[in-house]
Image: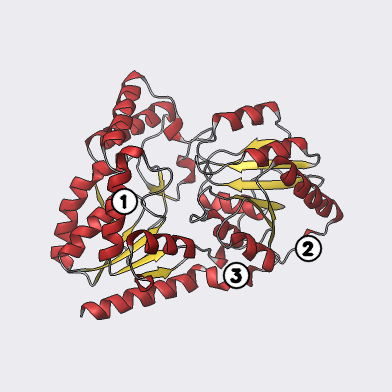
Amino acid sequence: MLTVQRDAERVRLPAPSGLVIDRTPPGAVSGLIAHVRARHVVEQTGQPYAPGRANDESAVASSADFNEMSLNWKGRLVRQFDRASGVLAFPDHFGQWAHAARLRLKQLLDAFVPDVVISSHEPATTLELGRVARERGFAWLVDLGDPVLTSYTPHRWRRRAHQVEAWTCRNASQIIVTTPATRDLLVARHDVAFERFSLLPQGYDRSDGPAYAPDKSLPVDPETLELVYTGSFYAFRRPQALVEAVVASSGVRLTVATRTPPHWLMEVAEAHPAKVRLAGFLPHAESLALQQKSDVLVNIANDDRVQTPGKVFEYLGAARPILHIGSSEGIAELLQERRRGVVAPEHPDAVRKVLGRLAEMKIAGSLAEHFDLRLDLFPEFEWKTLGDRLFGIVGELSRERR
């Protein structure tokens, strides 16, 4: 696996047996900012810095993710350069990685002569690297996920994003997308055949079922409907209706676990500490534990219908009811058909009415009666199932190359 060397990462998941990770420099400016941040962590914590210690949860700053710690004037200056480089590099600051990665990729292709080369998007840098392999005659599988050209693509990069996306769709050996809507969009946009695409959604591991010890610092109230949201806050995801509804509802509390909460949410949490609780950044295992002890998990749809938040599939493995806000391709129907969740329009009054019904179920102890919470309810979304399907796709491409 060819990926970027990010010395600022203090926690990494352990590599499974048989996986060799080849990390290349992130680029001059990104490398410098990572170095400055790493030194700042040592100054702030007084602990020796060892980048990427696997599963070392103690390495995470207790109050906030270390990337958000205030830097000194030198660090702030380097950070400004980093942001400026993100404006100049396509698709963002990860574009700085392309030069070193391209050189290393060519070395790896010559050394191993792989049967299949896989590019995983985002960032689009990986697609431009995959093009190198394809032009040299290798089978190329693209795990595209979302389109390259989206509603939030900066205007200065829209033409290039379209070009990268078009070349990928027309030349990749096979393309994996997560939703039919994404496939249909790309087929129409670039006039390519449906057969070039395979649908492979995100998923969950059933072994992630109730097995994690609860975090005692985040107690639950038996008289309160405990909502949990774990994930990021993007410009194309609107949680305001949810937060307004929670503040206006009695007997309801929202716990949010995220790396960087928006400023307005921090203000709401400070003004209404009994209604909104910010858990900060949590390692994956702790995030799963928080999900599993919730009453209801919250999923917020993206503005773009072709994009389905991947977090909702992880939620399926938590075996808890899901409140889905907004519209996403197939998700609302799936939750309702299998009695795993409820759907609310993106409006505070509509969300508040749903919260009222869920709070009544919590007090009556009937949540488990209204929802189907079996762990094996979504076998087609389990990682083992999806992995088998991916293995089959790779096998077909490998045989075609031979």
- Regarding residue 26, the answer to whether it shows in the image is no
Q: Against 25, is 180 above or below? A: below
Q: On the image, numbered disc 1 is attached to which residue?
A: 162
Upstream in sequence: badge 1 or badge 2: 1
At 35% from the left and 42% from the top, the residue drawn is 51
Q: CA distance from mark 1 to mark 3?
A: 35 Å
Q: Locate the C terminus by quadrant.
A: bottom left
Horizontally, residue 303 falls left or right of residue 369, namely left
Front residue of 73 and 298: 298
Task: State the mark number for residue 370.
Answer: 2
Q: Nearer the viewer, mark 1 or mark 2?
A: 1
Query: Dividing the picture into quarters, in which one does residue 112 lie?
Result: bottom left
Residue found at the far right of this picture: 364
Front residue of 214 and 192: 192
* Residue 17, horizontal then vertical, whole percent: 36, 66
Inspect the image, locate mark 1, and give the three-letter code of the amino acid beneath it: His
Q: Residues within 10 Å of mark 3 (few under 14, many from 20)?
A: some
Horizontally, residue 173 falls left or right of residue 252, namely left
Inspect the image, locate mark 3, and give the three-letter code of the amino acid beneath it: Phe
Regarding mark 3 in the picture, which secondary structure is present there? loop
Dot 1 and dot 3 residues touching (CB under 8 Å): no
Q: CA distance from mark 2 to mark 3?
A: 17 Å
Horizontally, residue 231 falls left or right of residue 193, namely right
Front residue of 25 and 171: 171
Dot 2 and dot 3 residues touching (CB under 8 Å): no
Inspect the image, locate mark 2, and give the three-letter code of the amino acid beneath it: His
Query: Dividing the picture into quarters, in which one does residue 238 lie?
Result: top right
At 40% from the left and 56% from the top, the residue drawn is 14
Task: State the mark number for residue 378.
Answer: 3
